[in-house]
Image: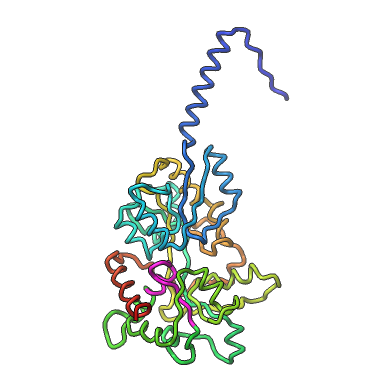
Amino acid sequence: MKRSFPLFKSNSLLLSVAIILVVVVQGCTLDNSADKPLIILTHDSFDIGEDLITEFQRDHHAEVIIQKGGDAGEILTKAILTKDAPIADLIYGIDNTFLSRALNEDLFIPYRSPLIDQVPGKFHIDPEYRVTPIDYGYVAVNYDLSWIGSNQLTPPEDLYELTTEKWRGKLIVQNPATSSPGLAFLLITINRFGEEGDYTWKEYWSDLKSNDVKVSDGWSDAYYTAFSLWGGDRPLVVSYSTSPAAEVYYSEEPMDSPPTGVLMTNRSVFLQVETIGIVRGSKNHKLAERFIDYALNKRFQEDFPTRMWVYPVNKKALLPRIFEFAPEPDPKPEIQLNVSAEDLDEWISDWADIVIRR
């Protein structure tokens, strides 16, 4: 049935109603929108559906600007250098490798989203919720199966194998000073070989250096330029356990199995948890809180697995079928935390002395 409204017969009544409407509209505007756009500083791999960003903008009468700034280490450096005059309201992509440095710099203000209860407790990596877990993945060495087969080799089964003549000049890694997977791989080797004993992580990297390891600044350059699968000359690359699934997903020809494999044995994998946090000094922190809530909801969490090739932290989110080619390691590694910024700086400096400066 069509609903109709009677016409107002009094100018004074019309004026009163108009004033009330203006107050209501202004109140809604003050509650739900911001004078300035919501700026999100993130790494170059960030990818989310445009429809989700459009929906958030519509629902909150706001503009969202995604500002990509390189790898995770690079965006952290930018945030630190500009913390007295912040260039963003939110930072998306600081993970547990760089987290201690970010918290040590006091970059974020606390916010506990009501949706955090849908995230398993092991991912709550900051008890003060200065950052919120948003996704996770596994950093590991990937290998080109076709290259290995054509050269009549077998895939490596242990990190130590990468120092042998068999793999001379075959591995590319990322710089741990600028790349989160690069730093994760450094932490893998420190955990695997230790800091004391007859053969430490430093000896391991010295052997990799002697075995002609190649270093790139970030993941994209390592994977899409140097990796043999994409025309490079290195059949081994530090990447993610989900990379094989991504290769199947994006292949122009149907594939029954991935063209790449993953070294996931004997403490060779790092569990990486990415976060989102509200930058201290943001003038948009209420809208930033709403975006964190939005990023934790099921729809957002189910959108990015086949875009960024990471796992959702929300336990209610479902994984796409393609992730059958991205099994999680068994047993799953522990989340490495409580690494001080001072230790990280020392390890990266020592790594540079061995691999870059020598």
Determine the residue located farthest toward the front in the rendered image. Answer: 357
154 up-or-down from 255: above or below: below
- Give the percent coordinates (x, y) of residue 323: 58, 67
235 up-or-down from 7: above or below: below
The one of 262 and 36 positioned closer to us in this rendering: 36
Q: Which residues are magenta?
A: 171-186
Q: Quadrant of the C terminus?
A: bottom left
Determine the residue located farthest toward the right in the rendered image. Answer: 1
165 up-or-down from 30: above or below: below
Which residue is rendered at x = 46% and y = 58% of the image?
Answer: 69
Is 278 part of what is drawn in magenta? no
- Give the percent coordinates (x, y) of residue 18: 55, 17
- Give the percent coordinates (x, y) of residue 128: 32, 52
When asked about the image quadrant of residue 93, the answer is bottom left
Is 180 part of what is drawn in magenta? yes
Q: Quadrant of the N terminus?
A: top right
Which residue is rendered at x = 38% and y = 68% of the image?
Answer: 177
- Give the percent coordinates (x, y) of residue 102: 34, 58
251 up-or-down from 51: above or below: below
The one of 94 and 322 positioned closer to us in this rendering: 94
